[in-house]
């Protein structure tokens, strides 16, 4: 009797297990179908999202590059126009030079003088800074060996690396502009190279060629506002 009861219990358990397994198999199949469906939907959504983000980022980069190119081109043309006026005699350099000498002698400095404000590159960046403020942009004039320490890019920083890359690119005959996103600050950065022209030489050129001698015919290697001439070309 005990053996019969044990056999019956084992048979009942086997049937229960068989039914549970059958139900689990059925549920598993349903779960698999639902899971695969959800996975497919998630994959499609992810791919679509990534594709949208990449496309949107590319379009935004192109739009900002065009805006920056136009913006800096206007600044560069303002500089070029001021340079032409400087070279063709439209600006009375002697009068402005005398005014500058008086300001320097009195300790007022050169920044408020008409001569300084008429320097082509100053005209260009002043126009750009004023326009940038209205447009909500940040305009800077980073340069290596900058006379204004505030314009010297931080060594190893994003701006210094970008300026180095632009310099090498221009030296190799490539485009005179470069654009990149600073991932640390999530900002779009555009740089345009400035080429020196003849109007720049009285301040930055070779003193032997461009420094104005004094009454005794001597030169001191300093430009009109007192900076050492760099001898650039």
Image (cartoon, rainbow, N blue to C red):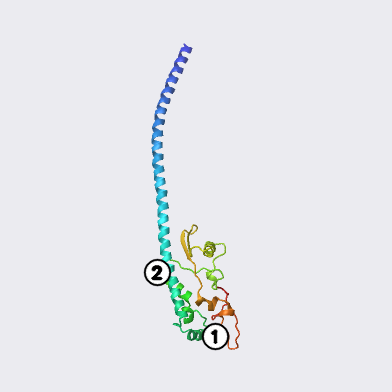
At 40% from the left and 31% from the top, the residue drawn is 29
- Disc 2 element: helix
Q: CA distance from mark 1 to mark 2?
A: 36 Å
Give whichever of 221, 7 is nearer the camera: 221
Q: Is residue 124 visible?
A: yes
Estimate the x, y position of residue 108 in percent, counting from the top left. 51, 82
Tell me where residue 42 appears, x and y as whole percent.
40, 42
Which quarter shows the C terminus?
bottom right
**Location of mark 2 (residue):** 134
Residue 161 coordinates in the image, percent (x, y): 54, 62
- State whether residue 24 is above or below residue 118: above
Residue 129 visible somewhere in the drawing: no
Mark 1 highlights which residue?
Answer: 105
Q: Secondary structure at mark 1?
A: helix
Above/below status of 23 relative to 169: above
User: In the current view of this chain or complex, which residue is farthest to the top?
Assistant: 1
Residue at 41% from the left image edge and 66% from the top image edge: 70
Residue at 42% across / 52% down in the picture?
54
């Amino acid at each position: 009797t005990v053996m019969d009861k044990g056999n019956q219990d084992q048979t009942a358990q086997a049937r229960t297990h068989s039914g549970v397994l059958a139900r689990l198999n059925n549920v598993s199949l349903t779960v698999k179908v639902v899971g695969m469906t959800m996975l497919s939907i998630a994959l499609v959504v992810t791919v679509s999202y990534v594709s949208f983000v990449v496309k949107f980022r590319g379009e935004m980069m192109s739009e900002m590059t065009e805006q920056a190119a136009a913006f800096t081109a206007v600044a560069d043309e303002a500089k070029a126009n001021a340079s032409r006026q400087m070279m063709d005699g439209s600006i009375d350099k002697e009068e402005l030079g005398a005014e500058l000498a008086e300001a320097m002698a009195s300790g007022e400095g050169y920044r408020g003088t008409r001569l300084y404000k008429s320097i082509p590159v100053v005209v260009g960046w002043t126009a750009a800074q004023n326009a940038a403020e209205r447009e909500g942009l940040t305009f800077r004039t980073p340069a290596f060996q900058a006379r204004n320490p505030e314009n010297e890019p931080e060594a190893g920083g994003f701006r210094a690396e970008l300026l180095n890359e632009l310099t090498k690119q221009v030296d190799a005959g490539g485009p005179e502009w470069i654009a990149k996103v600073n991932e640390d600050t999530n900002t779009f950065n555009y740089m345009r190279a400035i080429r020196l022209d003849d109007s720049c030489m009285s301040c930055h050129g070779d003193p032997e060629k461009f420094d104005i001698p004094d009454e005794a015919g001597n030169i001191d290697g300093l430009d009109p506002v007192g900076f050492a001439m760099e001898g650039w070309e």
